[in-house]
Image (cartoon, helix red, strand yellow):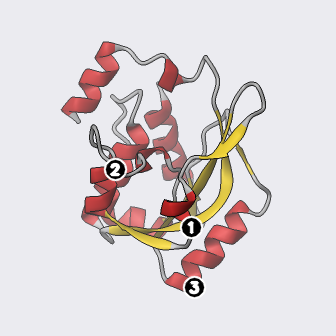
Amino acid sequence: LGPGAARNLGIAAARGSWLAIFDSNDLMRPERLETLLRRASTDRAEVIADNILVLAEDGRQKPFLPPGFAGAPRWISLARFIDSNRLYTRIPDLGYLKPMLSLPLLRKTDVLYDESLQIGEDYDFLARVLAKGPRRFRLEPQTLYVYRRHASSTSHRIKGAQIAALIEA
């Protein structure tokens, strides 16, 4: 049924205090969840995301967010998050980040993934959570999530109907 339906099943089954979004073909460093929990606790964040390490098929790797943007922990407002996903913006596309969210916040906002989306579903979900909840999230500058970029990734095989659904959302 797609990524949104799978994530909604995970949200419904979740029983802990936090929910971490994670794609099945990606990796995370062993200390990721502990580091994000510590930052969220210290900074009283209900939503937190870290920088992404982009790992190419040939083994090359680089941080997704440049040091000038992610050199230190910072708050990202809903407006800045939306602005980062607009065409020709100078802000890195923050919709690629994989957040960790407070489960009580998710229950309070009652936001679920739009199951009609096959691409951009994480951006749409987080934007709607932020709009109904804290209106900002904390960015941890460390690269703890590893995005494996490869030719068969959904983001490299986008179709017109997927773009139309995202525009509609």
Residue 60 pos. (x, y %): 74, 34
How many badges with numbers are in the image? 3
Residue 12 pos. (x, y %): 49, 51
Which residue, given by chain and number where applicable, does mark 2 sit on? 84
Q: Earlier in the sequence, mark 1 or mark 3?
A: 3
Could you say which quadrant of the image residue 167 lies in? top left
* Residue kind at label 3, given as amino acid type: Thr
Choose between 53 and 115: the one closer to the eye.
53
Q: Residue at x 76, y 25 (%)?
A: 58
Q: Residue at x 68, y 63 (%)?
A: 33
Q: Earlier in the sequence, mark 2 or mark 1?
A: 1
Residue 66 pos. (x, y %): 54, 54
Which residue, given by chain and number where applicable, does mark 1 sit on? 71
For label 3, the SS is helix
Which residue, given by chain and number where applicable, does mark 3 sit on? 42
The answer to whether residue 160 of the structure is visible from this angle is yes
For label 1, the SS is loop
Above or below 43: residue 143: above
Image check: 133 left or right of 143?
A: left
User: As drawn, which residue projects farthest toward the left?
Assistant: 168
* Residue kind at label 1, given as amino acid type: Gly
Q: Gap in Å between the C-alphas at discs 3 and 2?
A: 26 Å
For label 2, the SS is helix
Choose between 92 and 95: the one closer to the eye.
92
Marks 3, 2: nearer the viewer: 2
- Disc 1 crowd rating (10 Å Cα; few below 14, some 14-19, many 20+) is some
Q: Gap in Å between the C-alphas at discs 2 and 1?
A: 17 Å
Could you say which quadrant of the image residue 51 lies in? bottom right
